[in-house]
Image (tube, helix red, strand yellow):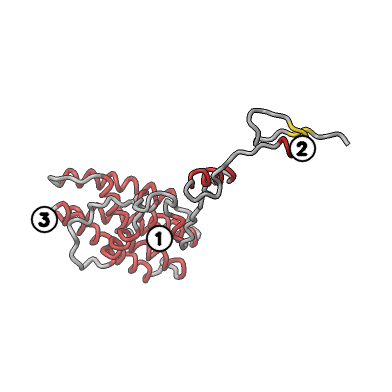
């Protein structure tokens, strides 16, 4: 059997030895096991260990249904996605309650928030309720709303000294449409073409007109011109009522 030549790191230089010749072996003195030389021991230990990299940990937010509308993965103080888009359900609720209770005093700062999510939602619900009764009036709804908004915006800026911007005008007109939206929901189950339907429509028009004119004259300080403000606003809501009845 041929002798196998091996190379050992225990030799100085690169000496070759024959396997099975113990007299030619040379060893170094080492301080392995000596507690006083911990550096060499630790260096040898860590040299034998593979490089360990920390494994990334992913924390998934498994919140409720509304957590899907947040911006997960961002900083903890980042606002929700709906709030960044200008959709605030608390503001929608507070303004809707202000419209449903017109006898309550209106806050002067109610128009500070130019919220258009509520008006767009009410117009959509109004159109869907009319659709359920066989009336496809989506184009008429948004067309009348656009023309009415432009007209009332111009009238208010001509009558008031401080003036009002278009976003606030559209917000008030859209939120005060809520009584007619409720009337259209009733029209899905009961026909409104009879005498009771006409009476309910008149009451809804008065309700919408009173709520919107109250908000406008309170914010713009036009209490002496309330009738002049209520007349064009009432004409706008009459158009929506006609869509509901006929």
In the image, which disc is placed on residue 244? 1
The residue wearing badge 2 is 21
Percent x, y for residue 171? 29, 52
Query: What is the residue that sits farthest to the right in this orientation?
Result: 1
Front of the two marks 2 and 3:
2
Front of the two marks 3 and 1:
3
Percent x, y for residue 62? 49, 60
First in sequence: mark 2 or mark 1? Answer: 2
First in sequence: mark 2 or mark 3? Answer: 2
Q: What secondary structure is marked by label 1? A: helix
Residue under the image location 13 percent in, 53 percent down: 222
Which of 82 and 135 lies nearest the eye of the viewer? Answer: 82
Q: CA distance from mark 2 to mark 1?
A: 110 Å
Front of the two marks 2 and 1:
2
Residue under the image location 35 percent in, 66 percent down: 198
Which of 79 and 172 lies nearest the eye of the viewer? Answer: 79
Are there few (<14), some (14-19), or many (20+) residues within 10 Å of tag 2?
Answer: few
Percent x, y for residue 227? 17, 56
Percent x, y for residue 40? 51, 43
Quadrant of the snapshot with the C terminus: bottom left
Location of residue 103 with respect to 78 vertically, above or below: below
Query: What is the residue that sits farthest to the left in this orientation?
Result: 224
The residue wearing badge 3 is 224
Would you say residue 156 is visible in this rendering? yes
Q: CA distance from mark 2 to mark 3?
A: 120 Å
Q: CA distance from mark 3 to mark 1?
A: 32 Å
Q: Is residue 144 left or right of residue 159?
A: right
Which of 112 and 63 lies nearest the eye of the viewer? Answer: 63
Q: What secondary structure is marked by label 2? A: loop
Mark 2–mark 3 CB contact (< 8 Å): no
Location of residue 132 with respect to 58 vertically, above or below: below
């Amino acid at each position: 059997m041929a002798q196998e030549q091996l190379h050992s790191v225990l030799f100085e230089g690169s000496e070759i030895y024959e396997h099975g010749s113990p007299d030619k072996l040379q060893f170094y003195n080492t301080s392995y096991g000596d507690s006083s030389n911990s550096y060499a021991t630790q260096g040898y230990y860590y040299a034998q260990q593979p490089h360990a990299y920390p494994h990334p940990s992913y924390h998934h937010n498994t919140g409720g249904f509304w957590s899907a509308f947040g911006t997960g993965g961002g900083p903890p103080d980042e606002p929700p996605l709906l709030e960044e888009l200008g959709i605030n359900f608390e503001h929608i609720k507070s303004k809707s309650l202000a419209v449903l209770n017109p006898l309550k005093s209106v806050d002067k700062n109610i128009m500070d928030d130019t919220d258009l999510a509520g008006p767009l939602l009410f117009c959509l619900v109004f159109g869907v309720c009319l659709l359920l009764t066989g009336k496809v009036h989506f184009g008429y709804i948004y067309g009348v709303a656009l023309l009415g908004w432009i007209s009332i915006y111009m009238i208010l800026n001509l009558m008031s000294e401080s003036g009002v911007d278009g976003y606030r005008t559209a917000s008030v007109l859209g939120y005060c449409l809520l009584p007619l939206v409720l009337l259209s929901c009733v029209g899905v189950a009961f026909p409104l073409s009879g005498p009771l339907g006409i009476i309910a429509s008149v009451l809804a028009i008065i309700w919408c007109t009173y709520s919107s004119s109250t908000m406008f004259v309170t914010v713009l300080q036009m209490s002496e011109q309330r009738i002049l403000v209520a007349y064009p606003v009432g004409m706008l809501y009459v158009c929506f009522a006609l869509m509901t009845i006929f």
